[in-house]
Image (cartoon, helix red, strand yellow):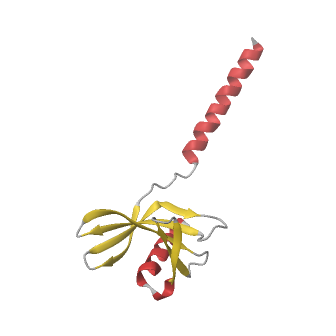
Amino acid sequence: MKLVKKWLSFGILVFTFLVVGATISPSVSSAEDVWFYSDGSWSFYLCSETINDRGNEHPKYTVQVKKVVNGTYQGDFEFLGFTSDGSYCYWYNRMNGRWEGSQRVSADPYTSAAWRAMQPYL
């Protein structure tokens, strides 16, 4: 009987720690589409849940871009990839499965805005 009480007490203690730990730990942010650039009637959004740190792979950071035209969602537009320091951007070619087209981020308002918008999620 004493052994049952000890295990029951231990179980209640563990349960209490799990409940308290879950209530005081910070909550995980939810995914959202983050506006980063507009050009006339076109607006572009980063899908925050697709921001990915690929470690030692090239490009290091990737993100999915969505396009809205005149307030209507047009679908997944493209994937962008960035070097570790954000100085160069690449586009993912869905036809051949390769990252292509090196662009200096500082020279292009679109990729520069995308890189800045990614910063809070890296």
Residue 17, by quadrant, is top right
**Quadrant position of the N terminus in the picture:** top right
Horizontal and vertical percent position of residue 80? 48, 71
Q: Residue furthest top?
A: 1
Residue pictured at 65% horizontal, 65% vertical? 55
Residue 67, x across and y down, in percent: 33, 68
Residue 47 vertical position relative to residue 116 in the rendered view, above or below: above
Vertical relation: 11 (above or below) 46? above
Quarter of the C terminus within the rendering: bottom right
Quarter of the image for residue 111 reads bottom left
Q: Residue 89 location in percent, x, y?
A: 52, 77
Q: Nearer the viewer, residue 17 or 105?
A: 105
Does 29 sit left or right of 7 as displayed?
A: left
Q: Residue at x 29, y 64 (%)?
A: 74
Q: Is residue 108 above or below residue 90?
A: below
Choose between 69 and 48: the one closer to the eye: 69
The number of numbered discs placed on residues in the rendered structure image is 0
What residue occupies the far front of the structure in this picture?
96
Task: Name the residue: 67% across, 31% down.
Answer: 13
Q: Residue furthest right?
A: 3
Residue 23 shown left or right of residue 1 in the figure: left
Q: In front: 60, or 6?
A: 60
Q: Is residue 77 left or right of residue 61?
A: left
Please report the residue visible at 49 percent of the width from the left and 60 percent of the height from the top: 50
Whole-percent x and y of residue 35?
A: 37, 70
Which residue ends up furthest to the left in the rendered image? 70
